[in-house]
Amino acid sequence: MTKIDALRRLLPCLSPTTATSKATATPIKKRLSTSLRNDVVDPLHPVLTNTNQDKDKDSQDSTTTTDLEPPVSAFSRPSRSMVIGTIFGQRKGHVWFCFQHHRLSTKPSLLLELSIPTHQLVQEMSSGTVRIALECDHSELSSCPLHSVPIWTMHCNGRKIGFATKRKATRHNRLMLKTMQSITVGAGMIPTGVGSSGSEEIMYMRANYEHVIGNSDYESFHLVNPDECAGQELSVYLMRSR
């Protein structure tokens, strides 16, 4: 099975598509990705337990809380919106992630270059669950908006695998996004020379994401699967640790 077949299999309700296919109107029904890692509590989705369990858990929090747990005010209300997210990269290269508020825009709201190789991400996605955590240090970047942080420490499914770097969209990036203006949801290939200065085709997976803003130190993006389709669970977290 080729890597592109593996990508398409991860979104089973989607038919194969290319950069020239027509737009698809996909109803937004289901968000599956809700937590970061087994050892990190999702501040926006606390687990409900009985009184005795709460007491036992409180006694353990001082020793089990990790540095990755994002600080969230008890009275803060998360802001939620829908965006279009695109994961792409050359077969022998590494992964990029961008999100856009408008499908027709060729200027991404955020563009990140991830150090994880494309083939490794495809392997991680074969398990059905991918959680990418990007962290920055609060002491050094406390006044910097999350979308302006220049470099992040990256974890994928609980393992530290390198860094992520904020990038400004190049002419090739804008051309690639322009070729996908008619695509809302799909996975496929972009021909050589479109969106890349290299000689390789670009693999991509494009879908709707729920964008959750917890506070100035915490944001997340969660892949929304088509209705009645289990599909892929994928989340990207931006966190400023204290």
Image (cartoon, grey):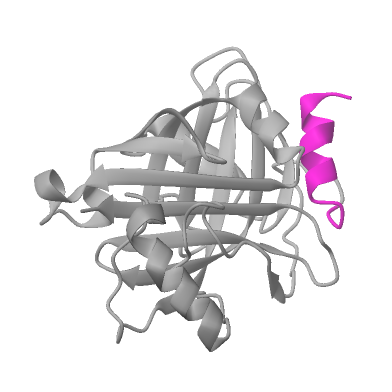
Check the picture and name the quadrant holding the N terminus: top right
Position of residue 90 measured from the top left corner of the image (x, y, whole percent): 60, 23
Give me the residue at 54% from left, 51% from top.
Answer: 37
Give me the residue at 77% from left, 37% from top.
Answer: 126
Q: Is residue 109 visible in this depiction of the protein?
A: no
The range drawn in magenta is 1-14
**How many callouts does the rendering have?**
0
Position of residue 34 measured from the top left corner of the image (x, y, whole percent): 58, 65
Position of residue 122 measured from the top left corner of the image (x, y, whole percent): 69, 32
Give me the residue at 33% from left, 54% from top.
Answer: 239
The one nearer the camera, 30 or 137, is 137
Q: Is residue 61 above or below residue 21?
A: below
Q: Is residue 120 left or right of residue 94?
A: right
Magenta segment includes 83: no
Q: Is residue 61 above or below residue 97?
A: below
Q: In which quarter of the view is residue 173 placed?
A: top left
Q: Is residue 161 left or right of residue 149?
A: right
The one nearer the camera, 69 or 163, is 69
The one nearer the camera, 59 or 94, is 59
Q: Is residue 8 left or right of residue 235?
A: right
Residue at the far top in the pictured view: 199
Q: Is residue 203 visible in this depiction of the protein?
A: yes
Give me the residue at 38% from left, 63% from top.
Answer: 61
The one nearer the camera, 111 or 74, is 74
Magenta segment includes 9: yes
